[in-house]
Image: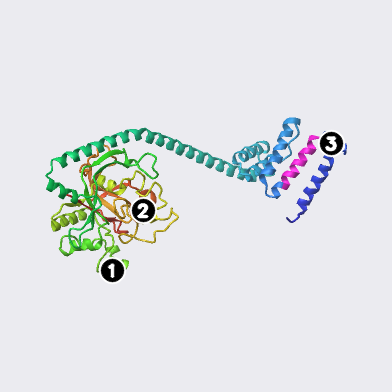
């Protein structure tokens, strides 16, 4: 470190004062307290020059101890220096207290009045910010504690309801099986065999059979990113196996309906396959920019075209299919950290990249345990249900909720620009049935087929 005249003067003063205090000099332990005050002031100055505000503050605190013990006189400007050291040491509360003391003693006549006022303002702002931060931390901690208590309180109830619902489902399944002729029983067993993949026509969506079952719908109070729209959690029974499209409906599958003049040709015009540089001979890319009403046109056409009962999934069926037996926030786990392996969404808060700026081609990521791809991310998926802002009164048999605000319909799963907290199995939102999102073509569809 370079020597300066001020630093050399301080060092010389320190040496002289140290000599006075050395054994054998004569003053020894009987040095006047005022000499010790000068020693600590000089040491504090040197520490401040060295950038060690904590050590400087400790030296100044020793002067306060001397005052308490020996009633020594505090030097002019002491409290301002103390405030500066406390501020530099990161102790805004002590800095504010010391600068107030300085201003009380000097009023407007102190040498450092203007600097002291500025320091007070900074220290007060820092103190208030710290108090606000601590208050917010305390609030969040209290909320988390209450949420955890609520989760723990409802878990035993949900577990018992789930057990009883599954027992009832299995009993009804056995009853129906016993009442079914053997030949018909074999046909239904094959039709509803979980994991069976099929298509009903060329150009129709590829379907996979999802088994019957029971599950807990909604999110627990402790789930990060949740909203009250996702509660109360409740047990839902899916009484029979049903088929779900393995992928979201593609442009190619939509155009099969267009070619028969059953569906509009202007859907997703801002993200058409030619704009995205994909093969127009197959149009193998998730359909976007569709309305709920247009989705109804498509499933009606698909039903007429195949002679089968196609429809949108109910909201309960959608969450059951998305969870695929999981109880975590996402079908791959609780954390969003593995999102890039399973879907594409906004990556700003993640440490990975899924490699796609827009929605990815079907099958680009890992499926869930039911063999379904892109249940979250990619495109938002409309369901059959009317919008309700909670699950109070929701059906528990897997059927669509066809009452409430039916001008709005439930969409699920988030899309390729959604933040991780929206790419969750329980995330839900309502949009007008005739709403067409054209800036990003965020809305697509996935279809279901009743198996009879």
How many callouts does the rendering have?
A: 3
Q: Say which mark, if any, is on residue 418.
A: 2
Estimate the spatial distance between the alpha carbons at disc 1 and disc 2, rounded to whole Å: 26 Å
Look at the image and tell me in which quarter the N terminus lies. Answer: bottom right
Q: Residues within 10 Å of mark 3 (few under 14, many from 20)?
A: few
Residue projecting furthest to the front: 182
Give the structural element (helix, strand or loop) at label 2.
loop
**Is 73 placed left or right of 222 in the picture?**
right
Q: Residues within 10 Å of mark 2 (few under 14, many from 20)?
A: many
Q: Which residue is mark 1?
A: 279
Give the structural element (helix, strand or loop) at label 3.
helix
Taking the magenta stretch, the answer to whether it contains residue 94 is: no
211 is higher (above) or lower (below) than 131: below
Pick whichever, 90 or 331, lies toward us: 331
Could you tell me if the residues under marks 3 and 1 are in contact, i.e. CB atoms within 8 Å? no
Q: Which residue is mark 3?
A: 28
**Is 285 placed left or right of 14 in the picture?**
left
Point out the stretch of residues depicted in magenta. 31-46
Give the structural element (helix, strand or loop) at label 1.
loop
In this figure, which colouring scheme has been used for the structure? Answer: rainbow
Estimate the spatial distance between the alpha carbons at disc 3 and disc 1, rounded to whole Å: 94 Å
Pick whichever, 320 or 452, lies toward us: 452
The quarter of the picture where residue 60 lies is top right
Position of residue 67 measured from the top left corner of the image (x, y, whole percent)? 73, 33
Pick whichever, 338 or 382, lies toward us: 338
Residue at image location 70% in from the left, 50% down from the top:
50
């Amino acid at each position: 470190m370079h020597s300066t005249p001020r630093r050399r003067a301080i060092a010389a003063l320190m040496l002289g004062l140290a000599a006075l205090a050395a054994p054998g000099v004569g003053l020894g332990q009987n040095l006047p307290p005022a000499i010790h005050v000068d020693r600590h002031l000089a040491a504090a100055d040197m520490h401040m020059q060295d950038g060690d505000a904590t050590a400087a503050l400790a030296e100044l605190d020793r002067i306060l101890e001397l005052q308490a013990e020996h009633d020594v006189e505090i030097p002019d400007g002491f409290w301002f220096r103390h405030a500066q050291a406390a501020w530099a040491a990161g102790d805004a509360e002590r800095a504010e207290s010391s600068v107030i003391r300085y201003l009380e003693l000097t009023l407007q006549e102190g040498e450092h009045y203007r600097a002291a006022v500025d320091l007070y303002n900074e220290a007060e702002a820092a103190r208030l910010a710290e108090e606000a931060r601590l208050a917010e931390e305390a609030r969040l901690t209290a909320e988390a504690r209450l949420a955890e208590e609520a989760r723990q309180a409802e878990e035993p109830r949900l577990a018992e309801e789930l057990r009883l619902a599954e027992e009832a489902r299995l009993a009804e399944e056995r009853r129906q099986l016993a009442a079914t002729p053997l030949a018909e029983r074999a046909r239904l067993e094959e039709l509803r065999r979980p994991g069976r993949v099929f298509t009903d026509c060329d150009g129709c969506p590829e379907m996979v059979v999802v088994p019957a079952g029971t599950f807990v719908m909604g999110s627990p109070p402790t789930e990060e990113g949740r909203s009250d729209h996702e509660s109360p959690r409740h047990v839902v029974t899916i009484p029979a196996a049903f088929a779900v499209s393995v992928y979201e409906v593609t442009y190619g599958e939509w155009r099969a309906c267009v070619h028969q003049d059953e569906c509009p040709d202007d859907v997703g015009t801002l993200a058409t396959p030619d704009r995205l540089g994909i093969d127009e001979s197959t149009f193998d890319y998730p359909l976007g920019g569709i309305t709920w009403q247009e989705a109804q046109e498509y499933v009606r056409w698909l039903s007429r075209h195949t002679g089968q009962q196609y429809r949108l999934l109910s909201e309960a069926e959608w969450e059951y299919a998305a969870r695929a037996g999981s109880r975590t926030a996402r079908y791959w786990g609780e954390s969003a950290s593995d999102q890039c392996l399973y879907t594409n969404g906004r990556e700003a808060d993640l440490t990975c990249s899924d490699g796609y700026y827009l929605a990815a081609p079907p099958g680009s990521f890992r499926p869930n345990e039911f063999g379904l791809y892109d249940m979250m991310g990619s495109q938002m998926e409309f369901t059959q249900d009317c919008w309700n802002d909670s699950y109070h009164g929701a059906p528990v048999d897997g059927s669509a909720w066809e009452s409430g605000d039916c001008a709005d319909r439930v969409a699920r799963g988030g899309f390729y620009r959604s933040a991780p907290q929206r790419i969750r199995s329980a995330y839900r939102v309502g949009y007008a049935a005739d709403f067409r999102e054209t800036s990003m073509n965020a809305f697509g569809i996935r279809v279901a087929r009743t198996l009879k």
